[in-house]
């Protein structure tokens, strides 16, 4: 009898895994392409405005409208689609424009992809909602009693080992608090947003100031991204000699130093080149180091909390460039320099906040350990 039940469970689990696998593929394709189509349409608008000779001030407004619409749409889709589907949507939103740029904005391949999207939606509707739900419910009901018995046995085992589990919990490193998850997410939000903002606006800053030719502003952008790669490459070697926390301190301080130079000295194209490469080199290793900050501080973090940090950070490359663009549009070209200094200071402030929160969690953990040891000692008396 038990052998037949095990066989039935095996077949049921196999069916559920196959169902989940098929739906995962459809979700990946559908929401990935959906995000890519929306983002690529925004790229087409920007491309068309350039080709039609729109003035740069109006072109900035086009960028603002596109970013604002994408932000509002992302917030709505995040509520409608759920976390898993929205992550796929975000991935497609950033990958598809790059592919389209390689194909050419007027290439017909992009519109073939759009047609595939229309064809995939009916398949998804047939695969997921009613037919498979009935099958899954019948399978779940047949094993409901077996699951209840297993749950009873598990609860009995938990009661027996409760004291041992409590002892292990207080001896381990503390879990990361939800508040710190939000703070780390905001820090990563600023880091990503700063990278994208500087890379997007430095060429426009050069053009609006009239420092040099338009091509020189593009070279400044290239130097910034070259600095990002250089900083991450250097971090591979220096991370063996420096602690991760020390390296982040150095990166944030260097970023502030370059921000001060950027604001104090008279601006010219040579200084713009130096600061662009300096910003990139200083901030290059920050993203991967901040993403693993909890482990560096010896805090336990769940995969769901890591995903939450990434979800908060994903809005950085939309919101921060938008804010910087509005600053330039409403307060003048010099707002770019002040924004760079402001975000550099924000990064080190939130980083220091993370260290303070982690220290308080360890103090609380030590207090709990001492209290638990006292309780055990009283029980033995």
Image: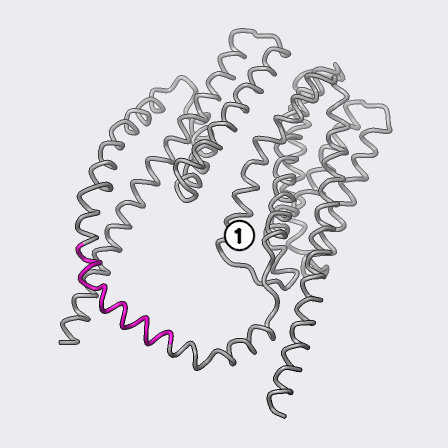
Residue at 43 percent of width and 82 percent of height: 160
Which residue: 28% across, 29% down?
116
> Quadrant location of the N terminus?
bottom left
Is the magenta region chiefly helix, strand or loop?
helix
**Residue that appears at 67% across and 26% down:** 324
Which stretch did the figure color magenta? 138-155
In the image: residue 154, left or right of residue 118: right
Q: Quadrant of residue 155?
A: bottom left
**Residue 2 in picture, x, y percent from top left:** 17, 76
Give the x, y percent position of residue 325: 65, 22
* Disc 1: which residue: 306
- Which residue is at 66% across, 47% downward? 286
Out of 96 and 344, give the one closest to the viewer.
344
Q: Element at badge 1?
A: helix
Whole-percent x and y of residue 147?
27, 67
- Report crowding for label 1: few under 14, some 14 to 19, many 20 or more residues within 10 A (C-alpha): some
């Amino acid at each position: 009898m038990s052998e037949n039940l095990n066989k039935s469970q095996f077949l049921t689990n196999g069916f559920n895994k196959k169902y989940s696998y098929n739906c995962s593929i459809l979700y990946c394709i559908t929401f990935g392409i959906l995000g890519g189509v929306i983002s690529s349409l925004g790229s087409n608008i920007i491309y068309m405005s350039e080709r039609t000779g729109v003035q740069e001030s109006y072109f900035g407004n086009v960028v603002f409208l596109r970013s604002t619409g994408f932000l509002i749409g992302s917030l709505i889709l995040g509520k409608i689609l759920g976390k898993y589907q929205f992550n796929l949507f975000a991935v497609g939103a950033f990958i598809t424009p790059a592919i389209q740029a390689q194909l050419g904005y007027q290439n017909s391949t992009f519109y073939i992809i759009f047609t595939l999207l229309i064809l995939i939606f009916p398949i998804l509707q047939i695969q997921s909602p009613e037919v498979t739900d009935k099958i899954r419910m019948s399978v779940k009901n047949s094993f409901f009693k077996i699951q209840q018995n297993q749950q009873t046995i598990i609860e009995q085992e938990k009661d027996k080992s409760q004291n041992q589990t409590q002892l292990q919990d207080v001896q381990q490193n503390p879990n990361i608090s939800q508040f710190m998850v939000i703070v780390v997410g905001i820090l990563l939000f600023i880091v990503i947003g700063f990278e994208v903002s500087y890379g997007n606006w430095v060429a426009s800053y050069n053009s609006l100031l009239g420092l040099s030719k338009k091509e020189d502003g593009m070279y400044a952008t290239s130097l910034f991204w070259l600095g990002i790669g250089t900083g991450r490459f250097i971090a591979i070697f220096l991370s063996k000699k420096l602690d991760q926390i020390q390296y982040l301190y150095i990166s944030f301080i260097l970023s502030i130093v370059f921000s001060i130079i950027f604001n104090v000295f008279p601006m010219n194209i040579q200084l713009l080149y130096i600061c662009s490469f300096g910003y990139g080199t200083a901030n290059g290793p920050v993203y991967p180091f901040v993403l693993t900050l909890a482990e560096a501080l010896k805090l336990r973090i769940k995969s769901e909390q890591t995903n939450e940090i990434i979800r908060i950070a994903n809005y950085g490359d939309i919101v921060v460039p938008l804010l910087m663009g509005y600053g330039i549009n409403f307060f003048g070209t010099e707002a770019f320099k002040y924004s760079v200094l402001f975000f550099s200071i924000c990064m080190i402030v939130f980083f220091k906040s993370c260290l303070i929160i982690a220290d308080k969690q360890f103090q609380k953990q030590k207090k709990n350990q001492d209290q638990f040891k006292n309780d055990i000692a009283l029980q033995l008396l």
